Image: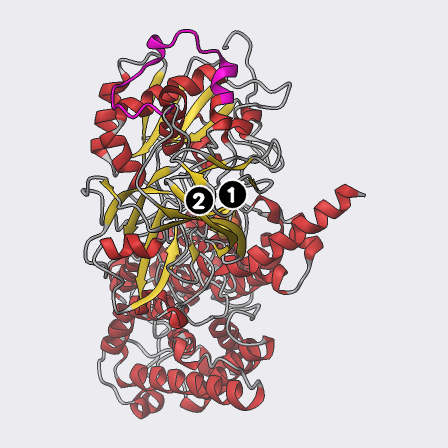
């Protein structure tokens, strides 16, 4: 079975909610929309206090090409344009909307009938990319890179395949897994749209073999869609890293940054993004809700929710039986790359794949120990780096040596565990130095 | 609630590996060999091991606390215990105990703590301690009690001089032409079981191999270093034996005699002083294997293992510098093969 070639680790999977069907979360009382839910320029609010909005209405427009508009997920009245502490831990400008009823934009097709490419032969690649752009779709695996940018590769590059990331290699998270089990057809149509958008006739869907039900269902359904192949992958973290996934599926290695995946012919998208693209193009539905896994060992009922953007996490946690008394840490995302949250009022955003509650004991960090050069970090690093060395060099502020040892290649996957703290510091400093040098 | 949330950077889960876990894991792997040595060498082995471990731990604690003022005491992490065990394993069972204390002081005090303690030393402390003792007290260090007489008292051994030549010494004599193959009395079975002369921990090959299997299974070490050493010795010594069977002993004697197994399994694999990458570890292992056979056959000392490892310890930083892991993305990307569109 295929997997990526260098390094990798096996963190405990803890997929507690894998058997929980997706549950529609209740509407919040007040929905909060940070204007910066993606990589790139923040969106610009186009509503004011007191404005009435409908579900699916644009409330902030894209701030540039590398940006994405934001749509309201609720109907009601704009309460204020203020700030909120989002998953990054920083205060960001945000639009608050008081929820009244649930009135959708009439243009959105709310039926569940499947619409395939055969029903819409008139769609051109340009139409698809346009739709994706106005629907505000961003990469939903967590990176939140505006999707239409990825679908417009730089001139001279030639996409050969679409690769769909359905690996979900983060422990605990099951949102993508459930989405595949419950919306396989919609996802597959989404993939055909992606293929059409970048004019390729081959797509791979990479799924780790800890989800055998998803693999067999998707393989079965994919028979009806020529050119789409499901690739079962051996479980190994971080297979969901885009470079690792390309290596695993087609055996090509993307060169060191700043090279893009398309330099080896691959266009990557998350499986949740493929679903969102289906809804945007075929159902005219902008991105305003997503599947979120709310989980944790002490949580009474770990659940997968279909939640509207802007729903405070506390509301979802309450729906799972409330915040356990022994909570020590709340993480937005998975345990390997997620961010510890400051409070539970952080709203669900486009990139929120999960909320993980850790108990007191799990959340404490271990003592710092001397490095005894056991070499395990070198064996684990999926980028072929030497984490022990990068960490030591960063501690010494030897930025020049850090750069020489390829610190910019670090994908911050956390396979080298405690060493990442210093490496991250070194990487961001070195990246800053490189940017400055290039600017000159 | 909100004010007692832990805010820290990812990753938020940890594999549970720690210095302690690895150190005590190695100690556990040494247990079979330790029990064998107690059985074969009796009280002497127990006394030497106890004194060695106790003094290593003591010196680590005193130096760490009063000389280095270490913020994080390293005495509980098991590394000093391990050094003590390995040092004892490299000593004869009837060695005067004060010599053991000196060895421990050199190993911990000079070789480990002067460089900054755990993780900072260049040389394997236990081996450097042994080498130091071998040079300083050559007589006491090369007088071995004959095993198979369990529970001899220490005094008895010293007074009666129940000592015997080790297979290694005989091998050397054979190479020089002062002895013949017939003098190599110890059968392979005796060597496997430990019924032969030698240092405390090195005689029972079987017990050491059990330790190796345990460490591999627990992923404390990888196969690269021990296998490359053993294979190199086997091939190199085997070629010499084939070329001249009356001068050079068969390779299995090399493999089972002296500290070869102990060194290959427990000493050369010391994390701190061995290379980081698989490629580096193989270079290191092959070099140790070659050096060992060369020293054993042509050098002044009968045992070459400890010196071979110490020499390669010195090369480790260099090997680390040249044997980088393969970076991701270096493999030339196959871009656009013709016809395959
Ligand atoms: S976080 Fe960076 S250095 Fe550490 S294992 Fe991942 S890629 Fe390697």
Q: Nearer the viewer, residue B239 or A260?
A: A260
Q: Position of residue B48 (x, y in %)?
A: 36, 84
Q: What's the magenta bit mostly, secondary-structure-wise? A: loop
Q: Is mark 1 within 8 Å of ligand 1?
A: yes
Left or right for A83, reference A23: right
Provide the secondary structure element on which disc 1 rests: loop
Dot 2 and dot 1 residues touching (CB under 8 Å): yes
Q: Is mark 2 within 8 Å of ligand 1?
A: yes
Residue located 27% across and 44% down the image: A305
Q: Nearer the viewer, residue B60 or B233?
A: B60
Q: Mark 2 highlights which residue?
A: A7
Separation of residues labelled 2 and 1 (CA atoms)? 7 Å
Q: Residue furthest right?
A: A440
> Is residue B277 at all visible to an observer of this figure?
no
Determine whether B222 is above or below B129 in the image. above
Q: Nearer the viewer, residue B320 or A35?
A: A35
């Amino acid at each position: 079975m295929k997997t990526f070639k260098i390094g990798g680790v096996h963190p405990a999977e803890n997929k507690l909610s894998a058997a929980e069907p997706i549950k529609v979360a209740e509407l919040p009382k007040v929905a909060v929309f940070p204007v910066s839910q993606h990589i790139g320029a923040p969106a610009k609010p186009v509503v004011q206090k007191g404005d009435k909005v409908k579900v699916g209405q644009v409330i902030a427009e894209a701030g540039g090409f590398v940006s994405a508009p934001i749509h309201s997920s609720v109907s009601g009245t704009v309460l204020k344009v203020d700030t909120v502490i989002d998953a990054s831990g920083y205060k960001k400008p945000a639009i608050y909307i008081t929820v009244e009823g649930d009135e959708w934009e009439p243009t959105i097709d709310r039926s569940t009938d499947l619409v395939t490419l055969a029903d819409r032969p008139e769609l051109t690649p340009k139409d698809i990319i346009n739709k994706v752009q106005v629907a505000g779709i961003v990469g939903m695996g967590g990176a939140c890179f505006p999707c239409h940018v990825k679908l417009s590769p730089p001139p001279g590059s030639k996409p050969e395949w679409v690769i769909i990331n359905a690996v979900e290699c983060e422990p605990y998270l099951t949102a993508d897994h459930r989405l595949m089990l419950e919306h396989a057809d919609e996802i597959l149509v989404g993939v055909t749209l992606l293929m059409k958008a970048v004019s390729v006739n081959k797509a791979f869907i990479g799924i780790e073999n800890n989800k055998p039900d998803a693999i067999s269902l998707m393989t079965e359904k994919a028979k009806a869609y020529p050119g789409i192949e499901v690739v079962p992958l051996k479980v190994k973290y971080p297979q969901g890293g885009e470079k690792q996934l390309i290596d695993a599926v087609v055996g090509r290695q993307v060169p060191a940054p700043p090279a893009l995946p398309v330099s080896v012919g691959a266009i990557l998208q998350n499986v949740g993004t493929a679903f969102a693209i289906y809804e945007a193009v075929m159902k005219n539905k902008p991105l305003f809700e997503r599947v979120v896994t709310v989980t944790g060992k002490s949580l009474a009922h770990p659940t997968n929710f279909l939640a509207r953007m802007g729903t405070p996490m506390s509301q979802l946690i309450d729906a799972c039986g409330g915040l356990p008394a022994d909570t020590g840490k709340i993480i937005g995302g998975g345990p390997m790359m997620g961010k510890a949250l400051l409070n539970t009022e952080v709203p669900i955003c486009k990139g929120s794949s999960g909320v993980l509650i850790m108990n007191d004991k799990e959340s404490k960090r271990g003592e710092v120990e001397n490095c005894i050069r056991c070499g395990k970090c070198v064996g684990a690093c999926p980028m072929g780096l030497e984490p022990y060395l990068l960490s030591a060099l960063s501690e010494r502020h030897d930025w020049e040596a850090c750069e020489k040892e390829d610190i910019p290649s670090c994908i911050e996957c956390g396979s080298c565990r405690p060493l990442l703290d210093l490496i991250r510091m070194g990487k961001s400093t070195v990246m800053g130095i490189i940017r400055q040098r290039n600017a000159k | 609630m909100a004010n007692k949330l832990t805010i820290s950077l990812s990753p938020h889960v940890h594999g549970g590996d720690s210095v302690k876990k690895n150190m005590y894991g190695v100690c556990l792997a040494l247990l079979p060999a330790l029990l064998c040595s107690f059985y074969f060498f009796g009280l002497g082995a127990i006394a030497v091991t106890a004194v060695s471990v106790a003094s290593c731990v003591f010196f680590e604690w005193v130096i760490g606390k009063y000389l280095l003022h270490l913020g994080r005491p390293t005495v509980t992490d098991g590394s000093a215990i391990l050094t003590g065990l390995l040092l004892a394993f490299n000593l004869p069972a009837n060695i005067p105990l004060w010599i053991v204390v000196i060895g421990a002081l050199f190993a911990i005090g000079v070789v480990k703590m002067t460089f900054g303690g755990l993780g900072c030393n260049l040389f394997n402390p236990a081996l450097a301690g042994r080498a130091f003792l071998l040079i300083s007290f050559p007589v006491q260090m090369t007088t071995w009690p004959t095993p198979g007489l369990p529970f001899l008292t220490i005094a008895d051994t010293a007074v009666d001089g129940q000592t015997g030549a080790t297979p290694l010494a005989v091998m050397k004599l054979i190479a020089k032409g002062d002895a013949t193959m017939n003098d190599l009395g110890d059968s392979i079975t005796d060597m496997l079981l430990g019924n032969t002369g030698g240092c405390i921990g090195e005689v029972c090959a079987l017990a050491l191999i059990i330790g190796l299997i345990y460490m591999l299974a627990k992923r404390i070490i990888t196969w690269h270093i021990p296998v490359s050493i053993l294979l190199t010795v086997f091939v190199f010594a085997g070629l010499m034996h084939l070329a001249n069977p009356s001068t050079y002993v068969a390779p299995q004697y090399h493999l089972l005699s002296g500290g070869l197994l102990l060194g290959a399994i427990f000493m050369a694999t010391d994390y701190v002083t061995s290379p980081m990458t698989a490629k580096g570890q193989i270079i290191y292992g092959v070099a140790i294997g070659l050096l060992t056979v060369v020293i054993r056959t042509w050098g002044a000392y009968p045992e070459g293992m400890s010196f071979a490892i110490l020499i390669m310890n010195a090369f480790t930083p260099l090997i680390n510098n040249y044997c980088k892991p393969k970076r991701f993305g270096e493999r030339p990307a196959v871009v656009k093969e013709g016809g395959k569109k």
